[in-house]
Amino acid sequence: MVHRKEIIDAADRRFTENEIPHGLIKSGYPAKPWENVQIASVQTLAAKIKKRKRSEWAPPPEIPYDIIVCDEIHHGCSRSYKEIFALYPNALILGTTATPQRLDGRGLGEVADVIVHGPSTKTLIEEGWLSPYILYRSPTVIDTAQFHIKAGEFDNEEVAAAFDNKKLIGEVYINWHQHADGLQTMVFAVNRAHAQHIRDEFVANGVKAEYVDGKTPPRERDAIFRRFTDKESTVLCQVMIAGEGVDIPGIDCVVMARATASLTVWLQAVGRALRPVYARGMPQDTVEERKAAIAAGVKPQAILIDHGQHWSRLSLPDTEHQWSLAGRKKKK
């Protein structure tokens, strides 16, 4: 179960590469209902449930699944997820996430019985499974205490008013030019207008930059991501579409050109650059070999540029966290 088209496509590629027969449950994708393994869109499954409610003639779930693996389980407290889980009361449900904390403070104990802690980001870096990083803060500090909080996040209009101006947009380019010039870079912006303004600033300075958001038509979105993955473009400016599930190891740099109150959003964003790229032909069986292969590769370290002071307000990317299934109390 996944919630983004990009994640469905990535999972489809990985399953195919590993010769795992599977079907796809997603509108517009070829169905293979006879396969024991299915990669399913949460939205498509939720639509099927609504159809069943409207008509007594709608068919029941096609396959009595034994195991459901739910990606990004921190979304799992929503009604659509719970309704899907309820269809399969005898299934084992494994939810995965790098950040088991919700913006609204609700605990994942609503859908999970046990939390199993995997290795931390710090451990994965130390063992050569993730890239080491260098983090640069911006010279201009925006006082985030001025922003009101709605549903656990800063008011988006207030953040846009603070960040979407000529001076700070120019600073995004200047900092990138100083610390990551020419590197494959993903920019996290406040909103569509802000992302487009940043894109325009890069283009005006001779950098091949593009823009994408959730309303970009699917074919155009695929083409934009392909050009970025193939390094035909250098900078990809986007809004809330690449924080989860984007599988592009070649991302060298992440620019956080906004401020968020969410630890989840921050860690998911910088995580896009921590995927390692090992030098071809070098062994990767031991910690030392993996580290040597990263150091000798095209991305010896990730570059993170933080314009929202998240490194001090929230945490460093490799800070150890004590995750819990319990919710958190609301704070003013």
Image (cartoon, rainbow, N blue to C red):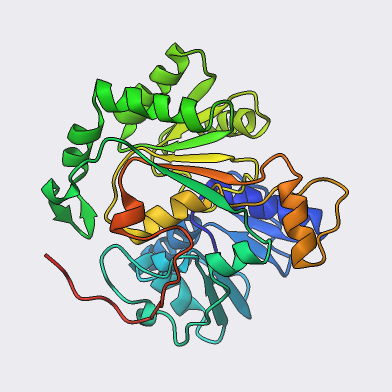
Residue extending farthest right: 281
The image quadrant that residue 159 belongs to is top left
Q: How many marks?
A: 0
Residue at the image point whose x is 63% and y is 60% from the top? 39
Whether residue 152 is visible to the viewer of this picture, yes or no, is yes
Could you tell whether 331 is left or right of 181 in the image? left
Residue 263: x %, y % from top left: 35, 60
Could you tell whether 263 is left or right of 148 in the image? right
Please tell me whether residue 141 is drawn above or below residue 199 in the rendered image.
below
Is residue 20 or residue 180 the one in the foreground?
A: 180
Is residue 146 or residue 100 the one in the foreground?
A: 146
The image quadrant that residue 166 belongs to is top left
Please tell me whether residue 1 is drawn above or below residue 241 in the rendered image.
below
Could you tell whether 329 is left or right of 300 in the image? left
Residue at the image point whose x is 54% and y is 66% from the top? 122
Residue at the image point whose x is 46% and y is 68% from the top? 73
Residue 26: x %, y % from top left: 57, 52
Query: In the rendered view of the protein, which quadrant contains the C terminus?
Result: bottom left
Could you tell whether 141 is left or right of 97 in the image? left
Is residue 229 or residue 35 the one in the foreground?
A: 229
Residue 8: x %, y % from top left: 60, 52
Residue at the image point whose x is 57% and y is 26% from the top? 234
Whether residue 21 is visible to the viewer of this picture, yes or no, is no
Query: In the rendered view of the protein, which quadrant contains the N terminus?
Result: bottom right
Please tell me whether residue 31 is drawn above or below residue 37 in the rendered image.
above
